[in-house]
Image (spheres, rainbow, N blue to C red):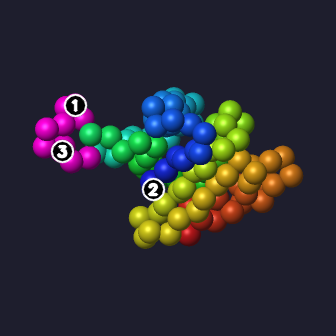
Amino acid sequence: MELTLRSSELSDDRLQRVTEELAAVLQNEAGISAQPPEGEAQVGSRGDPITIGVLLVTALSSGAVGALFNSLTAFFQRSKTLEIDIKRADGTSLTLKSENVSEEDRDRTLEHLREFVED
């Protein structure tokens, strides 16, 4: 799966830092492998190419979906304009926004995420 983070108020640099922080949290606290995609080097560019705000996540077990959701919820609380697109290998995507993870919508959103990942 591919996670793409977006925000109308975060700069590209800040969004990339948030993406890197999310990858670390997913790996260290949730046990979910999350890596930036490998890109193709551009002629004349320096360093490794990156795609800002994108992480590749390995297949998730049903228990890992809850850990993923809890990790994402913590990041939504830090930035109210953060949106995360989750895209499956078949191209189907689901977008989560901070308003989707409010206390009253939390259980419904988690169930929707579980169905999306397990489908």
Residue 119 tag number:
none
Of helix, strand and loop, which one carries label 3?
Answer: loop
In the rendered structure, does residue 40 fall within the stretch colored magenta? yes
| Residue type, numbered disc 3 | Gln
What range is drawn magenta here? 39-48
- How busy is the neighbourhood of tag 2: few (under 14 within 10 Å), some, or many (20 plus)? some
For image coordinates 26% across by 46% down, the residue present is 39
For image coordinates 46% across by 37% down, the residue present is 12
| Residue type, numbered disc 1 | Gly
Which quarter of the figure is the N terminus placed in? bottom left
Which residue carries the number 3 mark? 42
Mark 2 to mark 3: distance in Å?
25 Å
Mark 2 to mark 1: distance in Å?
25 Å
For image coordinates 24% across by 35% down, the residue present is 48
Q: In which quarter of the image is residue 113?
A: bottom right
- Residue 2, given in percent of the width and then of the height, sits at 45, 54
Residue 47 tag number:
1
- How busy is the neighbourhood of tag 3: few (under 14 within 10 Å), some, or many (20 plus)? few
